[in-house]
Image: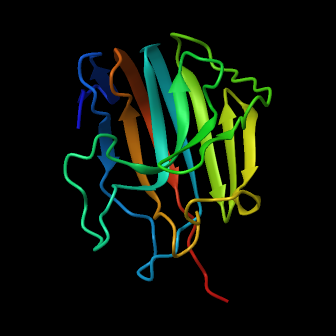
């Protein structure tokens, strides 16, 4: 993919240049899915700071695959799934499904208050429980979505959907500089009835 990622003193920094059309992705090489492919519930807390451009935090995502299930090398976007928008716009904190429905929250012309402070450190919390997704920015909920009621290109949160991989994104074809720190993920222990 495009862009570069570095980690210095616990801060992950992503840099992308406008001349590169590829998206830059930093995958967390861990799947929080059961052996049978079921998606786990999780909570992620992190801090982010956007100096310029468009970034995102992906979850319940995967690398694009062909009909046989093999990863497509050099795919121009490199990811399918849900991301929390991380940028300087009024949609920061919104939910977008890449290679799927597009904007989930805000949907269409729905009003949205991002609560993100531009060019400053911000706190984000992402909670996924079953088909419910809640996004909090700086201590206030900005999005709460029940994905069961939406028309999906593929199911989300079940065995036919995406696993619970995480990735940080740098948008292609624009100058991007973003930082992430204090990243914590909690996955509850599953107890089968």
Where residue 107 sits, quadrant-wise, is top right
Q: Which colour scheme is used?
A: rainbow
On the rendered structure, is 68 left or right of 83? Answer: left
- Which residue is at a point 45% across and 70% down the rendered structure image? 33
Q: Residue furthest right?
A: 111
In the visual, does 51 lie left or right of 83? left
Residue at horizontal 19 percent and vertical 52 percent from the top: 73
Q: Which residue is drawn at 30% across and 55% down?
A: 29
Q: Quadrant of the N terminus?
A: top left
The foreground one among 188 and 118 is 118
In x, y percent, where is residue 192? 61, 86
Q: Where is residue 27 in the image (x, y as percent from the top left)?
A: 32, 47
Residue 169 vs 81, above or below: the answer is: above
Q: For the point 56% across and 38% down, which residue is it?
A: 84
Q: What x and y, as percent, mark residue 169? A: 38, 35
Which of the pair 123/55 is nearer the observer? Answer: 55
């Amino acid at each position: 993919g495009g862009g570069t990622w570095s980690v210095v003193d616990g801060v992950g920094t992503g840099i992308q240049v406008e001349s590169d059309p590829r998206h830059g992705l930093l995958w967390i090489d861990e799947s929080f899915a059961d052996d049978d492919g079921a998606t786990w519930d999780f909570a992620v807390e992190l801090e982010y700071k956007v100096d310029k451009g468009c970034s995102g935090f992906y979850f319940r995502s995967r690398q694009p695959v062909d009909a046989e299930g093999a990863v497509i090398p050099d795919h121009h976007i490199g990811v399918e799934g849900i991301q929390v928008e991380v940028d300087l716009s009024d949609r920061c904190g919104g939910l977008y499904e890449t290679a799927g429905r597009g904007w989930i929250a805000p949907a269409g012309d729905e009003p949205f208050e991002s609560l993100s402070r531009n060019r400053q450190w911000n706190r984000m919390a992402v909670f996924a429980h079953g088909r419910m997704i809640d996004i909090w920015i700086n201590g206030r909920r900005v999005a709460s979505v029940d994905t069961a009621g939406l028309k999906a290109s593929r199911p989300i949160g079940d065995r036919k959907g995406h696993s619970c991989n995480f990735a940080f994104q740098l948008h292609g074809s624009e100058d991007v500089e973003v930082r992430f720190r204090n990243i914590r993920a909690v996955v509850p222990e599953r107890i089968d009835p």
